[in-house]
Image: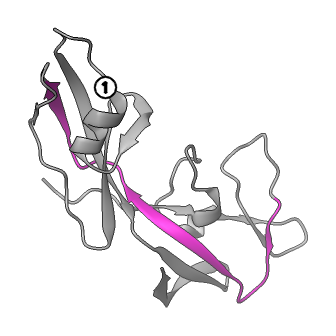
């Protein structure tokens, strides 16, 4: 399997929900009428509010969405079996979520089972799950000549 695409989101937009990540930090730049740039919001109904000047820095986080899909079976006694292991990516934090339910995101299979699936006695459940990875730290980019360039460090 080839490595998943690394996509970027401005750190200030990362929350329980966030706009779709983009292929490059520079893809978040929008030209301003009359010159200069603004940081795109990712929401056509929300106007840009951050106007950028040459040399200004913006922190970004990356996400790799496509680390696989699997089945997770949770047994009556709370034990479980998963068809995949959590991914490991240097500098990243692995996550698991129920397919189609991003609010179920957890940082381990054990946490997922405990937090999201309280079973009634006699119940067993098999779920489709997805695995993805977020950056553990911010990466700093500087606006230079209409592009964001990494400034060689991360913010912890």
Which image quarter: residue 143? bottom right
The answer to which of 96 and 141 lies nearer the viewer is: 96
Which residue lies at the image location 32% right of the left edge and 66% below the top edge? 92
Q: Residue 75, position in %: x, y?
A: 12, 22
Q: What predominant SS class does the magenta segment belong to?
A: strand
Which residue lies at the image location 67% right of the left edge and 86% below the top edge? 145
The answer to which of 123 and 2 lies nearer the viewer is: 123
Residue 21 visible: yes
Which residue lies at the image location 44% right of the left edge and 73% below the top edge? 137
Residue 24 visible: no
Q: Does the magenta stretch include residue 24?
A: no
Q: Residue 13, position in %: x, y?
A: 63, 56
Q: Give the range drawn in magenta.
A: 49-74
Q: Residue 45, position in %: x, y?
A: 78, 40
Which image quarter: residue 144? bottom right
Label 1 belongs to which residue? 117
Q: Does the magenta stretch include residue 58?
A: yes
Determine whether, in the image, residue 152 is placed left or right of residue 118.
right
Q: Residue 85, position in %: x, y?
A: 12, 48
Which image quarter: residue 115? top left
Determine whether, in the image, residue 28 is placed left or right of residue 130.
right
Where disc 1 sits, the SS reads: loop
Q: In this view, does 42 lie above or below 51?
A: above
Determine whether, in the image, residue 40 is placed left or right of residue 147.
right
Task: Classify mark 1: residues with Cα within 10 Å, few (<14), some (14-19) or many (20+).
Answer: few
Which residue lies at the image location 8% right of the left edge and 36% below the top edge? 83
Residue furthest out toward the right: 34
Determine whether, in the image, residue 46 is placed left or right of residue 41.
right
Q: Is residue 32 above or below residue 82?
A: below
The answer to which of 139 and 7 lies nearer the viewer is: 139
């Amino acid at each position: 399997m080839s490595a998943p695409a690394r996509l970027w989101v401005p750190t200030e937009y990362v929350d329980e929900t966030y706009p779709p990540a983009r292929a490059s930090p520079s893809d978040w730049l929008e030209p301003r009428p009359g010159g200069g740039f603004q940081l795109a919001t990712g929401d056509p109904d929300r106007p840009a509010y951050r106007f950028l000047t040459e040399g200004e820095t913006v922190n970004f986080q990356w996400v790799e969405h496509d680390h696989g899909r699997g089945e997770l079976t949770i047994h009556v006694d709370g034990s479980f079996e998963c068809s995949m292991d959590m991914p490991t990516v240097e500098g990243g934090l692995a996550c698991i979520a129920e397919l189609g339910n991003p609010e179920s995101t957890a940082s381990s299979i054990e946490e997922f089972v405990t937090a999201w699936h309280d079973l009634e006695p006699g119940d067993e459940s098999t779920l489709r799950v997805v695995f993805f990875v977020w950056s553990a730290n911010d990466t700093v980019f500087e606006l230079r000549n209409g592009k964001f360039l990494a400034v060689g460090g991360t913010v912890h």
